[in-house]
Image (cartoon, helix red, strand yellow):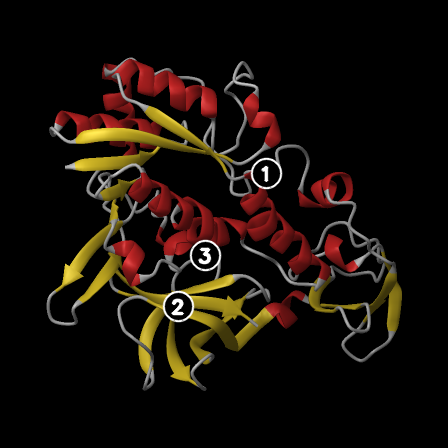
Amino acid sequence: MKIAVGMSGGVDSAVTAALLQQQGHEVIGLHLRLYKDEGDEAKHWLDRSCCKIGLAKHVCQQLKLDIQVFDVQDDFRSLVIDNFTDEYKKGRTPNPCVRCNESIKFGTLIEKAGEVGAEALATGHYAKIVYNKITKRYQLLRPKDQVKDQTYFLYRLKQEQLKKILFPLADMEKKEIYKIAEALDFPYEDVLESQEVCFVNQGDYRTFLKDETAVEAPKGEFVSSAGEVMGEHQGIPFYTVGQRRGLGVATGKRQFVIRINSTTNQIVIGDEADLYHKNLMVGDLNWIALDRLSESVQAGVKIRYKSTEAKAWLEPVDEKRIKIIFDEPQKGGAPGQSAVFYQGEVVVGGGVIE
């Protein structure tokens, strides 16, 4: 079977390619060039980006695999980075990794895999895909390595994508991957794990917005939930719901960003208790385990990648939105972030918090 492997330059994709090759498959490497500075292949490998072209080529050379590099800088800019900037302008907290997986890492890679004659696309993600003969749908499941579980970032995958994807590391743990990499003499002893936002390599996202996108951010008012003016903020894009540090407001007690109103250019601040929610509205839905939600169901919900799964009811509102009703109030749930729904090991689906 001819299989294209998305070669990011990381240890997981390298071992994925090696395992498939050992199984007798015809393997070809695909790499997506996302940044203009990625053309410098002599650049050291100790950055925290998720895609390293020098390492990807080095590994393919070791394995005697062909590798094709596709320039997708324009698509990455328009579909991921511009969306990232626009969301912060609106006072929302984006999740660029979710968007990149949907449109670039799988959307584009599956297309390119077809162009090179591959029957499937494999990546080094920690997740599992199975076909349910009863529902006749492909399901996305948690992997064996629960610590490295990446299903939260993959909930937007469609049925037509899932049927073409292979996750060879689904039943393996990270420590096993490192052992294989060491045995194959892959150069990963000092390579850092990629960070969540790959294109923000220096400082934090605020520095990126200022230096790389020249985002316009007029100053405005910090206000209490009662509407009392509490101080001046430096621009809506530079704040997120739940933020405590860097507010510059002296009230004698800890204050948090509770809500952001881009229409009035005001940021509501309050106590930590104000961050807890019993209900959340979620839109921009994608269902994996089922075609649509027609009745209320129980599920575990994650509202952040590292958050603990919370028990809740999912209640349909209309075709485009649902209401999450938590058993216990949950802290966070910033607009723009993803809420992902689980039933046991199965990813039911997910959407974007409103």
Between disc 1 and disc 3, the foreground one is: 1
- Which of 231/255 is in front? 231
> Percent position (x, y) of residue 300?
35, 68
Asked if residue 302 lies left or right of residue 59, the reply is right
Task: Name the amino acid type tagged 3.
Answer: Ser
Q: Is residue 240 visible?
A: no
Question: How far apart in space, not on screen, are marks 1 and 3 (Cα)?
Answer: 23 Å
- Does dot 3 land on a helix, a strand or a loop? loop
Q: Residues within 10 Å of mark 1 (few under 14, many from 20)?
A: some
Q: Quadrant of the C terminus?
A: bottom right
* N-term-proximal mark, 2 vs 1: 1
Q: Are marks 2 and 1 in contact (CB under 8 Å)?
A: no
- Which of 152/37 is in front? 37
Asked if residue 342 lies left or right of residue 255, the reply is left
Q: On the image, numbered disc 1 is attached to which residue?
A: 199
Asked if residue 220 lies left or right of residue 1, the reply is right
The disc label shown at residue 286, or none: 2
- Does dot 2 land on a helix, a strand or a loop? strand
> Percent position (x, y) of residue 143?
25, 48
> Percent position (x, y) of residue 93?
61, 58
* N-term-proximal mark, 1 vs 3: 1
Question: How far apart in space, not on screen, are marks 2 and 3 (Cα)?
Answer: 20 Å
- Which of 219/302 is in front? 219
Between disc 2 and disc 3, the foreground one is: 2
Q: On the image, numbered disc 3 is attached to which residue?
A: 307
